[in-house]
Image: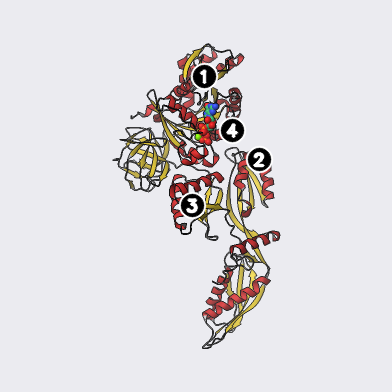
Amino acid sequence: MEYASKDIRNILVAGHAGCGKTTLIEALLYASGATERMGRVEDGTTASDFDPEEVRRKASLNSSVVPVEYQGIKYNMIDAPGLFDFETGACEGVMAAESVLICVSGRSGVTVGAEKAYRLAVKNNRARMVFVSKMDLENADYFKILEQLKIDFGPTICPCVVPARLDDGTVAYINLFSQKAFKYESGKQIQIDLPDIGHRFAGLIEAMNEAIAETDEALMEKFFEGEPFTTEEIVSGMAAGVRAGQITPVFCGSAVNQQALDMLLYNMKELLPAADAAAMVGEDAAGEPVEVACDASAPTCAYVFKTVADPFVGKLSFVKVLGGKLTSTSNVVNSRTGQAERLGKMLTICGKKQTDAAAIPAGDIGAVAKLTTAKTGDTLCDPARVVKLPAPTYPIASYQMAVRVAKKGDEGKVSGALARLIEEDPAITFAVNPETKQQVIGGLGTQHLEVAVAKLKNKFGVEVTLETPRIPYRESIRKKCKAQGRHKKQTGGHGQFGDVWVEFEPWDCEELVFEEKVFGGSVPKNFFPAVEKGLRQAAEHGVLAGYPVVGMKATLLDGSYHPVDSSEMAFIMAAKLAYKAAVPEAGPVLLEPVGALKAHVPNENTGDIMGETTKRRGRVLGMTPDEDGMQVVEAEVPMAEMQDFTTFLRQLTQGRGWFTFDFVRYEQLPQMLESKVIEQAKALGNLNDDEG
Ligand SMILES: Nc1nc2c(ncn2[C@@H]2O[C@H](COP(=O)(O)OP(=O)(O)OP(=O)(O)O)[C@@H](O)[C@H]2O)c(=O)[nH]1
Ligand SMILES: [Mg+2]
């Protein structure tokens, strides 16, 4: 069935891992009558956790779309994973949503995941609503959570439905709008007498009225005169406040026991913005900012907010339509590439279920099969109105591992499969390190990469294992030293002869600097390039551990030649001999890469971060506040000490912190660590291949 945009709500459900998002959506789907049985996360039977890895891990790993159609309204629920390693799902989902339903576990309270969900909503200017779940649990504590919400998110927090435990242990729910109380039997609402929750009740009503009064002058006047609001005034005032981002209403209930979900559904309709109210700001063809309203009569405009790479079905692009309606015959260009995009089948999505649809109307979410060039973040639009909507922003892939293929010959397949995987999850990075020749994959944490490996195997048939990436060390020298290299061979016929004196010295440079100071033609000019070539080849492998030599100048001082036996080859060999003789005497050292660390952490963690940085042989440079109220600890740290920093930071900050780390320069490796690196290099066979 096709819905008008005013009857559609696109809602991202976000919050901490395990707070009950997937179960809530499952319960809403069941409440709407779309399913006959409620699936369970534990059994892998929910509509949104259908991926084999999700079933195995009993947690959401990808965002999924589950439309709940209830009393003429289509609620497109976008289920975001709560695990921090899978934040990509929320980052993409928020682009298609007008509002964010922040789910908070009634037992665990306001945890980091809830904070992140709230901030994501504020940053993207989306309406917010809180649902406190698991109220059926004995130790659920709504009022404690309400206080915490106010402390964390400020006075916009406004309770709307509150629980009350009756004498027989059942949980009743008081609707503060109507001031009526209900209990639930098998999901059925039964009105009961208003339970006595003491002085708390008056306080809650007062708080709610105050929030509503703030939204409208007439209501403010009424409030000051002490006149009570009508239920309609309460609801419309609340709706205005929520849509303006002034009020964050708080609901509660139990998904598992189907309690108070009717009130949640009703108020999602009444309070949250409809799809037609949410415009997106993008750029027009000239790069000027332009607002794209959600309008069925406007030229076609659809935003790709998610991509699924299916090895059998092909690519599936999830779109939110803003303008017109999208059909398989729509004439659209991709504003990123400027190319026309041929549209395949239109689909309606419910978890893994795909149903053919004639069109995806303005305000709605659906999917298009087999788009050729489109990727997540692209805008497909009518050539007559080209607009570019902003791409989602992803967390930084700070955790990196090297990929090793299980089967020889699969190396080529890895990059192809990873490219597909990255289409699906753009927070993953992949590159070949030109120095270590390793294929390095980056993600948000250990679980993220574990799941990527599982997907590579299950979806694309490529088996890989992960290992700690090698550090691209370098070598250099600290002293001036010169030596002779004399290559002489007499093997019947004409021989080989080259003879050079080369001086090596530390120099402020990357690649080897070559100079010649030959007097009187002791080495003829035409052999200089051969000497330089020999030195460059030799410098590719340091004498300590076989790593490239940098920061060195070589000067050809003198030598001799033979009119018949000297050749380019002979001088290459002679240069290498000079290198081999001189460099071990020139105070060779190992250099290690050092990077600039910028760790964004809450105030209370700065001391720990500085301590840890020092422990990891780093130097703290300073501290500045960032725009999200965190502190940025800046330091320089050796790359070799950073491998598990992602995990460390996650644990220290409970997932709040994040960091960037960028190479800055090479520095001398402390002598006491040299032998370990040399041992590793030997094991890798680094020292054997210096004869190029
Ligand atoms: N008692 C009770 N348990 C619930 C309720 N909702 C969810 N749970 C349980 O809480 C656990 C986590 O639920 P999920 O729905 O997977 O939570 P989630 O927020 O989707 O988790 P992630 O996808 O990992 O972020 C499961 O064991 C659910 O059965 C509820 O209303 N009452
Ligand atoms: Mg989930």
How packed mark 4 is, by other alpha carbons closer than 10 Å (few <14, some 14-19, many 20 or more), is some
According to the picture, the residue beneath numbered tag 2 turns out to be: 605
Residue in the foreground of this view, choosing between 393 and 520: 393
Mark 1–mark 2 contact, CB under 8 Å?
no
What amino acid type should be assigned to the residue bearing mark 1?
Ala
What amino acid type should be assigned to the residue bearing mark 3?
Glu
- Give the tally of numbered discs: 4
What whole-number distance in Å separates the C-alpha atoms at marks 1 and 3?
61 Å
Q: Position of residue 366 (x, y in %)?
A: 37, 36
What amino acid type should be assigned to the residue bearing mark 4?
Thr
Mark 4–mark 3 contact, CB under 8 Å?
no
Vertical position of residue 426 compared to residue 490: above or below: above
Vertical position of residue 105 compared to residue 591: above or below: above
According to the picture, the residue beneath numbered tag 4 turns out to be: 111
Mark 4–mark 2 contact, CB under 8 Å?
no
According to the picture, the residue beneath numbered tag 1 turns out to be: 213
Picture disc at residue 463: 3
Residue at 69% across, 49% down: 615
Q: Who comes first in sequence, dot 4 or dot 2?
A: 4
The mark closer to the camera, 1 or 3, is: 3
Q: Who comes first in sequence, dot 1 or dot 2?
A: 1
Q: Secondary structure at mark 2?
A: helix
Q: Who comes first in sequence, dot 1 or dot 3?
A: 1
The mark closer to the camera, 1 or 4, is: 4
The mark closer to the camera, 1 or 2, is: 2
Mark 1–mark 3 contact, CB under 8 Å?
no
Q: Position of residue 654 (x, y in %)?
A: 61, 38
The mark closer to the camera, 2 or 3, is: 3
Q: Position of residue 653 (x, y in %)?
A: 62, 39
